[in-house]
Image (spheres, grey):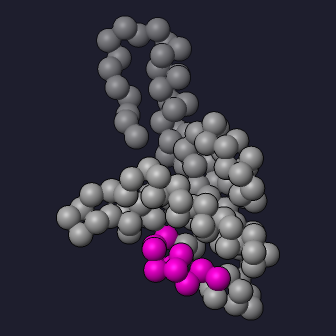
Amino acid sequence: QTESPLGVENAEEIYSLPGVDAIFVGPHDLTFQMRTPDGKDPTPEAFEAMLQRILAIGKKCGTPVGIHVQTIEAAHKRIAEGWQFIALGSELKFMVTEAQKAVEGMGLKNAGDLARY
């Protein structure tokens, strides 16, 4: 996994190691590691530049690179960019979404939130 600026800085050496078959990016972990010392998140542009750098290094080294996304739209975007494998959503998100659909399908006006994610 590549989840820190230091990992990106050393990505070419890491991705070229024998036995490294693929690289996976956890965007939330990477964002957290990119925070400034005062706790501010990176700008969207800085974050995107970091992702594109990871993708480019993976392509250069011939190491497949994948990423975790939350939406179908984001999956399509990343596939179009050349990411080679995608993790979409999470088990919890899928369960909550389907459970909410079931509650809504019951037509209960005062059901409230089933769960939040």
The answer to which image quadrant residue 32 occupies is bottom left
Location of the C terminus by quadrant is top left
Q: Nearer the viewer, residue 17 or 38?
A: 38
Q: Is residue 90 left or right of residue 29?
A: right
Q: Where is residue 74? Give x, y as percent.
A: 61, 42
Q: Is residue 106 left or right of residue 112?
A: right
Q: Is residue 25 left or right of residue 56?
A: left
What segment is highlighted magenta in the picture?
3-12
Q: Residue furthest right?
A: 62
Location of the N terminus by quadrant is bottom right
Q: Where is residue 73? Give x, y as percent.
A: 63, 36
Q: Main secondary structure of the magenta part?
A: helix
Q: Residue furthest bottom?
A: 18
**Against 20, is 47 above or below?**
above
- Residue at the image position 68 percent from the left and 54 percent from the top: 86
Residue 30 in magenta?
no
- Residue at the image position 47 percent from the left and 57 percent from the top: 47
Q: Residue furthest left?
A: 38
**Against 40, is 15 above or below?**
below
**Against 16, is 53 above or below?**
above
